[in-house]
Amino acid sequence: MADTAGATKRTYGDDAHAIKARDVHFEFDSVPMHYIPGEVLATHIVNVMHLVLPEGERAMAQALSEALPHIHDERLREEVIGFVGQETMHANSHEAARIHLQSIGLDVDSYVRKVAWLVDRILGDHGLTGRAKDQWLKERLGLFAGMEHYTAVLGEWLLNADILEEKGMHPAMLDLVRWHGAEEVEHRSVVYDAFMYVDGSYARRARTAILASLTLLPLFIVSTAYMYRKDPEADRGKFWLRQFASATRRGVIPSWTVFLTEIPRYLRPGFHPAQLGPMDKALRYLGHSPAARAAGH
């Protein structure tokens, strides 16, 4: 593997601060099934984070760990190690939320097992060796870089979605998704920089970004539909499509079109995640998050 491919393309600028995992803890005991009051479908769209993301984030952390031996830039190695720690904490925190929702009646265990199997089958290392192993690692890094672009964009949305507070979203769940969103903004450049370091091919970046977009959108749709069907409460409403349209129009959830409209920006030849905008709000939230404060950060 070419260790220096694309290394000169890395830019840090205002993002040049240490990425580190925060040992946070959330109390979910009082969280109800519909923790965004009156927004059943929107609640389950957020729930996708608790089911789908933990397995994807573990796979992403594994790929970055595999890439570490090929990264000799100490600054980037530091970023990657911090990123792996943050993703591991994300997965654990969301799993705790999923376990709580399971305990109050949202039966999702079989679906989670299927997601875990699918992620491993598609994004695992497959036991490859030699050149095939190197090429597959580059491909995975490209896919994960594309996915991280969307999580950073959604992270920005979560930090600015004041309507979630106005709707009375349960404080623990609101803190969980905003803490996660803020760290996605904070480490938005890491996977991209790692991909550029070990490969940097524009053709691979473009192809994997399109694949990431076309994978995430149906996964969100299928996962949300599953949880909506599994919702044990009688007041979930009958017309999920009307709920979806209404929640999108009122800004309770981001528009699904983000999975399509972000592609042109990511595919610009001179694109870098640092161009998404300032991360001041994300860093401020990480300094004031109730869970982070409780852990002493």
Image (cartoon, rainbow, N blue to C red):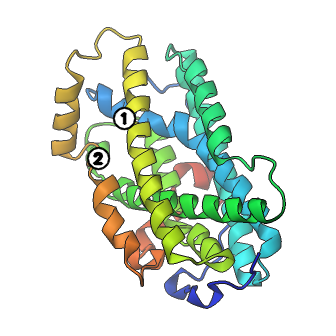
Instruction: State if disc 2 and disc 1 touch (CB < 8 Å).
Output: yes
Which element is circle 2 on?
A: loop
Q: Position of residue 172 (x, y in %)?
A: 49, 39
Question: Which quarter of the image is occupied by the C terminus?
Answer: bottom right
**What amino acid is at disc 1?**
Ile
- Visible residue check, residue 283: no
From the viewer's side, name the closer residue of 100 and 116.
116
> Number of numbered discs present?
2
1 or 2: tag closer to the N-terminus: 1
Q: Residues within 10 Å of mark 2 (few under 14, many from 20)?
A: few
| Tag 1 residue | 221
| Tag 2 residue | 256
Q: CA distance from mark 1 to mark 2?
A: 9 Å
- Location of residue 39 (image quadrant): top left
Q: Position of residue 127 (x, y in %)?
A: 81, 48
**What amino acid is at disc 2?**
Trp
User: Taking 21 as reference, is 30 above or below it?
Assistant: above
